[in-house]
Image (cartoon, rainbow, N blue to C red):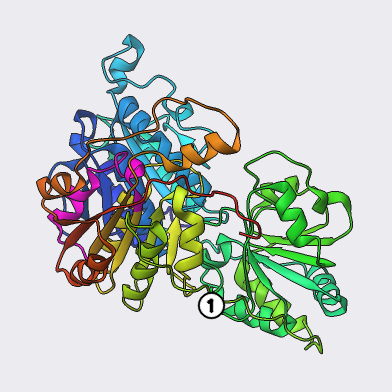
Amino acid sequence: MPKKPKPHATITVKSATLDLLRAFGIDKVFGNPGSTELPFLSDWPDDIDYVLALQEASAVAMADGYAQATRNAGFVNLHSAAGVGNALGNIYTAFKNQTPLVITAGQQARSLLPLQAFLGAERASEFPRPYVKYSIEPARAEDVPAAIARAYYVAMQPPCGPTFVSVPIDDWAHPAAPVTPRSVTRELGPERAAIQALADALASAKKPALVVGPSVDRAAAVDLMVQVAERAKAPVWVSPFSARCSFPERHPLFAGFLPASPGQVSETLGAYDVVAVIGAPVFTFHVEGHAAIFDGGTSLFQITDDADAASVTPLGSSIIATMTPALTLLLDLLPPTKRTAPPARPVPAPPQAADPMPAEYLLDALSKAMPAGAMLVEEAPSHRIAMQKYMPMPGQDSFATMASGGLGWSLPASVGFALANAERRTVCLIGDGSAMYSIQALWSAAQRRLPLTVVVLNNGGYGAMRSFSQVMQVRDVPGLELPGIDYVTLAQSMGCAAERVTRCEDVAPTLARALKHDGVFVIEAMLDSAVPLLYAKNG
């Protein structure tokens, strides 16, 4: 007769959860504590760092930046329904960023839930949907550790994304069995015949082009992407609204940035007979128009790890696979070509100093001053075209922005990136309007003396909206001006060093001080308030 297996030792839900975090390599928990989280946070262990944010949306964005930098799921602890509500904007951004997060939220005691208790969340698991991949409030307290384990596995599966577990306040002390961590593979191999068809199309094309998106950088596959482009001798465009740098922007094959306009994308890519979109949707648009690229004159291919993105692609062949195995096989199957490589993109002349200070001058100076290996985290949509022109990114792990278009992510996200790597400088480039969504993140960075430089581009309002009002031919739009905000005083009040720069001749020495400062340094750059151009031909 076989022996009965020995039962697992009984521990608590809390200790089982903390053991899971250790097993998953999660060394930080981001949050803003509320009453329903106190039992989880009591007697906090020394080996897991609790990172305090002063608002729940900032906690999510900090975890997002940290997860992107470490390529492991970030863990967030929020407060009941109100805290989750505060965080929803950056949960949406994490979903669009495809960032792996495990988000937990406190819930009222189970015995009180039928009575519509204060701080109780009704149908808690529905609140963050559809912008989480998995969401649950476990039926029993002892099921919480297994739910958190599943949330981690789901968050880490491509396409990565946030998951959510609601935990009643009295669950943490409940007895539970330990959950043994498992190994779950994450790479998806491509169908060989589909990659062969793409390789054949690129080899026989007269004028092929590649379009790269954020999944390449997220997969740490930029070097592979460069090898594929060089083998094909094909120009490389960046997909509209790409949130990462997936190709070195001073490489001779780098062609530029695709705009989010159907007409302009079609005009740019219509010159090619074969276009392969790698690690991006086909395509992300922001304005209306006819997308002639889908009329059939160009052969379209797509490699994506997102089956939903493949299912909505209007034309061509989609290959569902993760970037590293797909690009490795494509490089193996792609023969050398006798095509002549396209001419390199011209380097723009340096912008001239002026009064008031042009944004282009400041961005060019920042590009020249940034130390090697620095990470740029950006949320300055009204200056993005100027940034793309004068701040070329070097490639892998050099750039991040929000994929959602929602403001309030980049400043706390830069705190997460800086937390992940204290040996490199993180630079947050942010508009004055964007900064006010999450200015409290400066306090968290200052408390930890993080190597973070924040450059606030102050043009006195919402520059992107000023530009859109012209594009859409609407007038007298209220709420676009932001007079009277002193970002230097705000930063100093939260423990940061800060200076204001108004003249071009002061930019270089101010940047030098800011980028070498031991801790957080905020520069408020007073810029020309002229309405910027948001859509330029060929990016």
- Residue 310 appears in the figure: no
Q: Nearer the viewer, residue 538 or 526?
A: 526
Tell me which corner region of the image, top left, top right, bottom left or bottom right, holds residue 234: bottom right
Residue 299 screen position, x and y as percent? 85, 62
Q: In the rendered image of this protein, does residue 350 appear above or below residue 313?
A: below
Residue 138 screen position, x and y as percent? 42, 33
Residue at (41%, 26%) from the top-left corner?
124
Left or right of 489 in this view: 439: right
Amino acid type, callout 1: Arg
Residue 83 screen position, x and y as percent? 31, 31
Quickly name the residue at label 1: 250
Tell me which corner region of the image, top left, top right, bottom left or bottom right, holds residue 471: top right
Work out which quarter of the rendered image holds the C terminus and state it. Answer: bottom right
Residue at (30%, 65%) from the top-left corner?
426
| Mark 1 neighbour class, 10 Å CA radius: few under 14, some 14 to 19, many 20 or more | some
Left or right of 529 in this view: 27: left
Residue 208 screen position, x and y as percent? 79, 72
- Residue 470 appears in the figure: yes
Q: Which residues are magenta?
A: 430-451
